[in-house]
Amino acid sequence: MTVSPSDLTALRAALLNTSGTVPLHDRFRALFTLKSLKNDEAVTIISEGFADQSALLKHELAYCLGQMRLASALPVLESVLENLDEDPMVRHEAAEAMGAISSAGSTATLTKYLTDSNRSVRETCEIALAKIQWDNSEEGRQHVVSTEISDETTYTSIDPAPPSSKLLSGQPKPDDTSDSVIASLRTALLDTSVSLFERYRAMFALRNIGTPEAVNALAAGFSDDSALFKHEIAFVFGQLLSVHSVPSLLKVLQDASESDMVRHEAAEALGGIATPEVLPHLKEWMTREDSPRVVKESCQVAIDMWEYENSGQFQYANGLESVRIEAIVA
């Protein structure tokens, strides 16, 4: 994608809402457009957004920096993780992004926060450290080589943990999607006696299987007591876009006693699935007075995603097109 200096300036203005009039969902579109550029200039612009007041936006900034996998993002991600005044949801995402970039140089900082006062931050650092270690294992290195030469990978995201070995990439073989395999992965998913990293591997293996039975197994994870774990299941449902996950996601969104981090991820997953019955619920929780800010904002973004999925728009990350149109109109 070719961008001019004026395009970057316009994307920066949209992301940072310098005019004070840019809706949150349009700021998200600008963010994902910058993410797609995958260069240091985009990293610099995205990093400026951490001065914002919206925890949801800052959480998404950290996620995008991790997916870009550029070492130039590590200093700002480390500073976000080390900022004890920052929202834990943002700090957790910064730690996860460091795991996605997977630099051995991040190990010391991640290790430091294994004893953080916030459970989600602690757990994310644990998983990120395990991922960096796995990435540098023989299996991890072979996986990188295989994905570089294969076009069969269904999900292009950099996940916090790789799927279980037989489901690392490509289309699952029939033997890998049997009832017995799904039952075994469900057991591993729910086994709190093993590390979160291994439970996440089962989670992403079930995602790669993607059948209704696999969705049911994943939904069982919403009974866990870890907000981080449950939020990742909701994120996986947002990747799967399976209508079979809608009832469990709606239940999470509507549960006022559930963690805001989990509910926000459920809202965005529902927006991506975009079936007719989810829209009234998203509108309700976007406007309810008792709805937490991060849930309200997530529903706003989710409604924009719902509208996109039900439109003829070519791509969601169309921030560049939008700012160019605005420049012509102006």
Image (tube, rainbow, N blue to C red):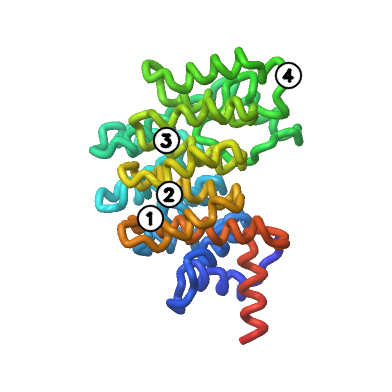
Residue that carries the numbered disc 3 in the rendered image:
230
Separation (CA) of disc 3 from disc 1: 16 Å
Tell me the quarter of the picture where residue 196 sits. top left
Indicate the position of residue 246 as horizontal and vertical percent values: 54, 41
The residue labelled by disc 2 is 264
Residue 76 % position (x, y): 40, 53
For the N terminus, give its image quadrant.
bottom right
Kindly identify the residue that appears in the image at 47 percent across and 55 percent down.
61
Label ID, residue 294: 1
Would you name the residue on which mark 4 appears? 174
Amino acid carrying mark 1 in the image = Val
Q: CA distance from mark 1 to mark 4?
A: 40 Å
Check contact, mark 3 vs mark 1: CB within 8 A.
no
Answer with left or right where residue 181 lies relative to residue 223. Answer: right
Q: CA distance from mark 2 to mark 1?
A: 6 Å
The amino acid type, in three-letter code, at marker 4 is Pro
Quadrant placement of the C terminus:
bottom right
The span from disc 3 to disc 4 (Cα, nearest Å) is 28 Å
Residue 104 visible somewhere in the drawing: yes
